[in-house]
């Protein structure tokens, strides 16, 4: 594989990849996590897990902890609009009931 092809697959530049093709898995892991909203610091345990010889970067305790925290964040983000929707739906129901009484 040419370095330009590797850079394209990893979503980075050839200059960044002058190190080694074996780092492709690391780069793909980081890129995927960042695409899912993980910041660079949150990707560190996944990279460390891969570098420790695990075939996947998310099987180590620190990686699992980051996954759990991210799920908690997402649950909170999902819960906020749901709560707002419920409030708006109650207000609408109250307003419709009040308008019928007039």
Image: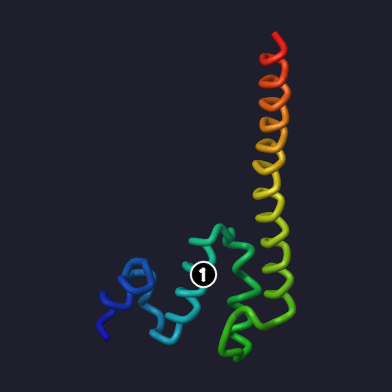
Left or right placement of residue 75 versus residue 10 in this view: right
Nearer-the-camera pick, 91 or 36: 91
Judging from the image, the colouring scheme is: rainbow
Q: Quadrant of residue 23?
A: bottom left
Nearer-the-camera pick, 60 or 24: 60
Image quarter where the C terminus lies is: top right
Q: Is residue 59 above or below residue 98?
A: below
Residue sitting at x 47%, y 81%: 25
CA neighbours of label 1 inside 10 A, class few (<14), some (14 to 19), many (20+): many
Left or right placement of residue 40 versus residue 3 in this view: right
Q: SS class of the residue under badge 1?
A: helix
Residue 83: % across, % down = 72, 40
Residue 80: % across, % down = 69, 43
Q: Is residue 55 above or below residue 66?
A: below
Residue sitting at x 72%, y 13%: 101
Residue sitting at x 46%, y 74%: 27
Left or right placement of residue 77 versus residue 15 in this view: right
Residue sitting at x 67%, y 61%: 70
The residue that label 1 is drawn on is: 30
Q: Is residue 53 above or below residue 58?
A: below
Image quarter where the N terminus lies is: bottom left
Residue 57: % across, % down = 59, 80
Residue 69: % across, % down = 72, 62
The outermost residue toward the front is 101
């Amino acid at each position: 594989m040419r370095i330009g092809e590797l850079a394209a697959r990893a979503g980075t530049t050839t200059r960044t990849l002058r190190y080694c093709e074996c780092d492709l898995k690391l780069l793909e892991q980081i890129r995927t996590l960042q695409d899912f909203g993980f910041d660079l610091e949150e990707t560190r345990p996944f990279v460390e897990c891969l570098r420790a010889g695990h075939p996947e970067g998310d099987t180590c305790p620190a990686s699992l902890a980051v996954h759990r925290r991210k799920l908690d964040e997402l649950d909170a983000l999902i819960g906020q609009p749901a709560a707002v929707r419920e409030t708006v739906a109650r207000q609408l129901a109250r307003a419709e009931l009040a308008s019928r009484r007039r």
